[in-house]
Amino acid sequence: MRRRRAGLGAALLAASACAAPETNQMQPLAERYVKLVLAVGQHDPDYVDAFYGPPEWRTAAVKRPLPEIEAEAAAVSAGLAAVPEGADPLVALRHRYLTRQVEALRTRVAMLGGKRLTFDEESQALYDAVAPHHDSGEFESVLAQLEQLLPGPGTLLDRYTRFRDAFVIPPARLDATFKAAIDACRRRTLAHVSLPPEETFTVEYVTNKSWSGYNWYQGHYRSLIQVNTDLPIFADRAVDLACHEGYPGHHVYNVLLEKTLVRDRGWPEFQVYPLFSPQSLIAEGTANFGIDVAFPPADRLKLEREVIFPAAGLDPAGASRYYAVMGLVDRLSYAGNEAARRYIDGEIDAAGATGWLERYGLYSTPRAKQRVRFIDQYRSYVINYNLGKDLVADYIDARAGGDAEKRWPAFTELLSSPRLPSGLAAGGR
């Protein structure tokens, strides 16, 4: 383990030695940023999502006073402002990325110090984006279509719950089903993306979490993926989780950042991932859109019928109707943002947020309560999944021109570069 870390450190030094002047000027500022992220992590256990830099940096991280962290972060911001972006487009992207990441860090420090922000203010400051507002009427039109697809007695939520319960993966088949999904997602990804031969991840099944799945990147091209089994897992979640957490989602994103920016370029700031930052919108957006890149609708349905449903012991004949229903339900995803916005802004309480999710998001009561726990823990982070997916989709499809095969090069380039959400919206700048 020490030998591998020392090798990575030497690679960073070698890469930075022959870098452009602007890169060399940013190197000490980037190192200070990494150490500041680790310092904030001493106050916020959720903040440091991944770190695989020099172990002595983590060991040296102590719980410094928040005003002291803010003062140093302000100095790093000033230092970055004094460095020109440079002629290399990737270095210019790096400069903007690092500047914005530091700004988000300062916002998180202020929040930890007691500063209160509205949902939209918080998402703009932390994630470089604001989700659109939707009223209940926009969701009602989707619910009306679902009423036609799911006739019968009881409320629409009751009928939807009964319908979906027929597609639960039996616990005894969960691991085999998930492994089948991972294998399919990996094969599809490797046909289009070149990854280091040593990349790998392990899967664990856990309980008592507010999320359904999580990728903990370990560095050296390795990830730990955890799947939460608190609630039943439905057939569609096998491919969703395998793509989102693995291929071509979080695992591939982190592997490519490590390969192209840390090892090849020698940029230390990518050895740390602060969760409450613009990077998360890119990470979650690419992970969610990566499902569609890997498996467009016809390919997805074929995979479900031929591989996933049989592995789960489910009747493949039901796959078409299942995905017709789930395609409509997906159009309710922004209802979750509205629940979080109203809840964080004090317009509704936890019970009100639960009820909103049940009514407009078709969450069962246990899932709605789990989602409110997620909002309590991660707040405006919820925008990164749906708004992130939409921004990434628009960015990729503008470059692919509607050609599914051309999505892959644009998608891989995005995963390998330091882009910001506002850069996606501005066409890539």
Image (cartoon, grey):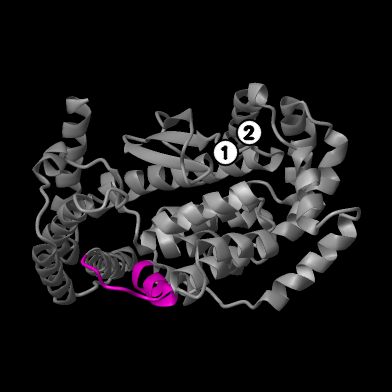
- From the image, which quarter does the C terminus lie in? bottom left
Instruction: Indicate the amino acid at tag 1.
Output: Ala
Residue 278 x %, y %: 37, 64
Q: Name the residue under label 2.
A: 181
For the residues bearing labels 2 and 1, Cβ distance under 8 angstroms: yes
Residue at 74% over, 52% down: 326
Q: Is mark 1 on a helix, strand or loop?
A: helix
- From the image, which quarter does the N terminus lie in? top left
Instruction: Indicate the amino acid at tag 2.
Output: Ala
Nearest to N terminus: mark 2 or mark 1: 2
**Magenta segment range?**
113-126
Crowdedness near tag 1: few (<14), some (14–19) or many (≥20) residues, C-alpha within 10 Å: many
Crowdedness near tag 2: few (<14), some (14–19) or many (≥20) residues, C-alpha within 10 Å: many
Query: Residue lying farthest top?
Result: 172
Q: Residue 132 carries which label?
A: none
Residue at 72% over, 32% down: 308
Q: Which mark is residue 242?
A: 1
